[in-house]
Image (cartoon, helix red, strand yellow):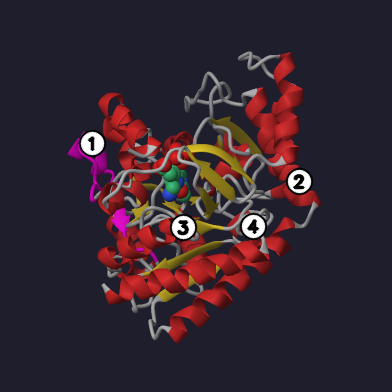
Amino acid sequence: MPISEELFERACRVIPGGVNSPVRAFRRLGRAPFFVTRAAGAHLWDEDGREYIDYVGTWGPAILGHAPECVISAVQQMVPAGLGYGIPTRVEVDMAEHLCRVLPCMDKVRMTNSGTEATMSAVRLARGFTGRPYIIKFAGCYHGHVDSLLVSAGSGALTHGEPDSAGIPAEFASLTIVLPYNDSAAVEQAFRRYPGQIAGVIVEPYPGNAGFYLPKPGYLEQLREITAREGAVLIFDEVMTGFRISPSGVIGKTGITPDLVTLGKVIGGGLPVGAFGGRRDIMDCLSPLGPVYQAGTLSGNPVAMAAGLAQLRYLEQHRCHDRLESLGARLEEGVRAALHDLQLPLTFKRSGSMFCLFFTTQDVFDLDSAMTADFGMFRRYFLSMLDQGVYVAPSPYETGFLSTAHTEADVDATVQAMRTALQAAKEA
Ligand code: KE4
């Protein structure tokens, strides 16, 4: 028996589903997940010695590839001084100043230990700042496993058919208004229906948890205009897109300024980090200054800060986003040529280093259109890619990520593998 399968059997006896996060389980793919032993650059190695080109990248953090030298050495320098103190440190100030400099909408920022903590805190802050009860989110957008936001959620919840998790009382969910993404009329209607009662709107500005797709022209601008007019807090959840879509995320790419932004993944360099920040008048409602309580034993952990800051500084100093765009364009060109040659008009979406191949011929711009994808075809494609040594996200409702560690040879080999995998998926 392969070592990964042995490990998975052991894992399933002591960890629910054998995994510490559901989307890792390969549940609907008909095989056990592989267990990784080592990762470097754009490549992974599993317990059975197999090597993979990696397009999951720890679900986003590995923008420089795995174990980049700049992050490793920053951690090695920090660790001898201690692993954490629960006392303020210089590196937390350095991180906060970096984030506030790069993201002009961020007057102040608070660190957390995950994206979930960041979105949970941002939503509580919006309610505390406005004194209003309701929050708008969008179907298919995933903001972590926050009770009030696990309603029509994406990512693993969608993959496993639990977009509305058990364990969340209807009373909690009743204060969450779920609307279709890319439909500003629906947002206008919600504000007419709940005048003066909506605390905020939280949105993945470029959604990456029902596959990856993009806002229609003007949509984000309309969200900004409506929330400003209505006095509601606009929260951009850039946990996935922050520092990836551009040097300053979707905010930098679009020039739209939300009131709050949530971050994670890239800003931790691979270690557990999240953050939320924005307008001073809103952020100053947080304890110990104001009445909105939020806390975390390991928030701003110096080792995690050192890792994240090293990655952010490297990104800024080495114009990495030009490289990511160049690799992304090469991948897109190869994919579109393959789809053309195979007479498979499947939908492909990309922005920079984020991309998704949808197993549908319909255009994709919201959850309903993303759900027209054929899961069986995806499964055959995924298994063939894995057999060929290419690891793409084990769900059609996730985003693919390139890193600066991917090479042209990696991309070309991936496109070649896709041709084989698509042929297999098509013929079954
Ligand atoms: P975490 O709590 O998983 O650090 O972050 C939650 C989160 C918040 N907002 C957005 C836009 C996110 O994409 C996420 C987490 N992303 C998923 C991948 N689609 C994490 C993977 C997992 O759940 O294992």
Q: Residues within 10 Å of mark 3 (few under 14, many from 20)?
A: many
Residue 67, given in percent of the width and then of the height, sits at 65, 39
Left or right for 335, reference 34: right
What residue do we see at 42% from left, 56% from top?
386
**Amino acid at circle 4:** His
**Amino acid at circle 3:** Thr
What residue do we see at 34% from left, 78% from top?
362
**Amino acid at circle 2:** Tyr
Residue corresponding to mark 1:
168
Residue 118, given in percent of the width and then of the height, sits at 49, 37
Q: Earlier in the sequence, mark 2 or mark 3?
A: 2
Disc nearest the viewer among 3 and 4: 4
Task: Identify the image quadrant of residue 116.
Answer: top left
Disc 1 and disc 4: Cα gap in Å? Answer: 41 Å
Residue corresponding to mark 4:
406
Q: Earlier in the sequence, mark 4 or mark 2?
A: 2
Residue corresponding to mark 3:
399
Query: Is residue 95 positioned above or below 187 on the image?
Result: above
Disc nearest the viewer among 1 and 4: 4
The C terminus: image quadrant: bottom left
| Mark 4 lies within 8 Å of ligand 1 (Cβ measured) | no
